[in-house]
Image (cartoon, grey):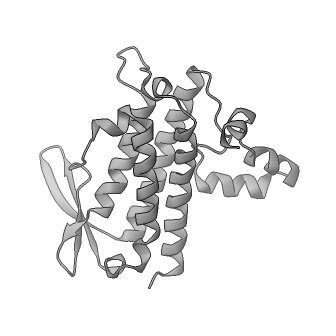
Amino acid sequence: MTNPMQAALIDEACHTLHQLMLFVGNLSSAQYTAVHGTDARHTIGKHVRHILDHYEALLAQGGTASTASIDYELRQRDPALEQHPEITLEHLRFLVKRLSRLGGRQTAIRPITLAHQAGEQSALLVSSLDRELAFLTSHAIHHMAIIALLADTQGIEVPDTFGVHPSTLRHWQRTFPPRQQQALQQPPRQQQEVQS
């Protein structure tokens, strides 16, 4: 059975990926694969694929019946996810479904070890599903903020809340009057028209 905190963390992760899904669904293949940076190594697609790889590593946790093991260095790095937005959309939908069912699995309560390498040293760090979900949301938001910058260079509008961490959104709710909050929650006009 999912504890309330774990349920909230799963909801945040699914909400974050849902935002990404709406964004990717409004992109053309050319926008998704357009290269950025002086070395031309950044694309929106590469950042999206990187986010998905990390969630997949969590969901593919190996180990024994009593302990799960995660290694973020053993990511899939599927080039199709960085080159084809339509494939990525299907993958995102499936990923959100799997994440939403995560709390109901017996594996949701077992301890997790995280394989980590620093320089030549490697260790198994003690973690938990809750800690990894919190990490993955922060990691995804960080990359979504970069994606928003890349989109901006192409003239693609993104919602004001895209790439903004849930803690910042909560701060905005406490700080700004309700009218300003509504403005922050509205997607740009261009995205509203595409979704209708």
Note whether residue 42 is visible.
yes
Residue in the foreground of this view, choosing between 101 and 55? 101
Residue shown at 72% from the left, 37% from the top:
193
Q: Is residue 7 left or right of residue 35?
A: right
Residue shown at 68% from the left, 58% from the top:
170
Image quarter (top left, top right, bottom left or bottom right) of the C terminus: top right
Q: Is residue 110 above or below residue 97?
A: below
Residue in the foreground of this view, choosing between 120 and 152? 152
- Estimate the x, y position of residue 134 in percent, counting from the top left: 46, 61
- Splitting the image into 4 quarters, where does residue 95 fall? bottom left
Image quarter (top left, top right, bottom left or bottom right) of the N terminus: bottom left
Residue shown at 57% from the left, 43% from the top:
163
Q: Is residue 19 left or right of residue 179?
A: left
- Estimate the x, y position of residue 79 in percent, counting from the top left: 29, 35
Q: Is residue 195 above or below residue 1?
A: above
Residue shown at 59% from the left, 25% from the top:
152
- Splitting the image into 4 quarters, where does residue 12 fall? bottom right
Residue in the foreground of this view, choosing between 99 and 84? 84
Note whether residue 139 is visible.
no
Q: Is residue 129 above or below residue 48?
A: below
